[in-house]
Amino acid sequence: MAAKKEKLTSTKRFGARYGPRSKIMFDKIERLQRARHPCPYCAYRAVRRVSVGIWSCRKCSATFTGRAYVIREEKAAKEAVAEA
């Protein structure tokens, strides 16, 4: 019986280029980056990435800096372990 393949949601735009492993890694990073994160000021899950390292809360309108793909590195590490 064949193993289940991971669905490549937004990486379908690359077509047959770059190989499956690169696309799977890219997909995990992109999902973390586009997810909603908790705000350090109001603790509401409404923080979205504006650009590289700039984050904005949609509820309290706080704009602050963080890491490139996630607000804190420890959160990304926990989510990566949970997915594996």
Image (cartoon, rainbow, N blue to C red):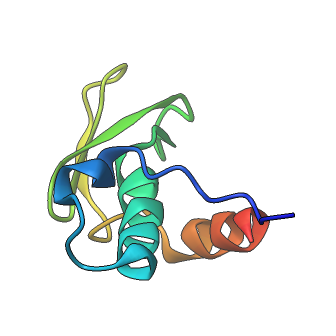
62, above or below 83, in the image: above
Residue for point 38% across, 37% down:
47
Observer-nearest of 66 and 33: 33
* Number of numbered discs overlaid on the protein picture: 0
Task: Residue at the far right: name it.
Answer: 1
Observer-nearest of 49 and 16: 16
51 sits to left or right of 28: left
Q: Looking at the rendering, in which quadrant would you find the C terminus?
A: bottom right
80, above or below 14, in the image: below
Residue for point 20% across, 64% down:
53
Task: Residue at the far front: name it.
Answer: 1
Give how far across and how far down residue 18 sits, in percent: 24, 79
Task: Residue at the far top: name it.
Answer: 59
53, above or below 61, in the image: below
Name which quarter of the figure residue 2 lies in.
bottom right
Residue for point 37% across, 19% down:
59
Observer-nearest of 66 and 1: 1
Q: Looking at the rendering, in which quadrant would you find the N terminus?
A: bottom right
Residue 10 makes an appearance in the image? yes
Give how far across and how far down residue 67 sits, in percent: 32, 71
56 sits to left or right of 45: left
Give how far across and how far down residue 15 sits, in percent: 21, 58
Give how far across and how far down residue 71 sits, in percent: 41, 61
Name which quarter of the figure residue 65 lies in.
bottom left
Residue 70 makes an appearance in the image? no
Residue for point 48% across, 68% down:
72
Observer-nearest of 2 and 7: 2
59 sits to left or right of 80: left
60, above or below 31, in the image: above
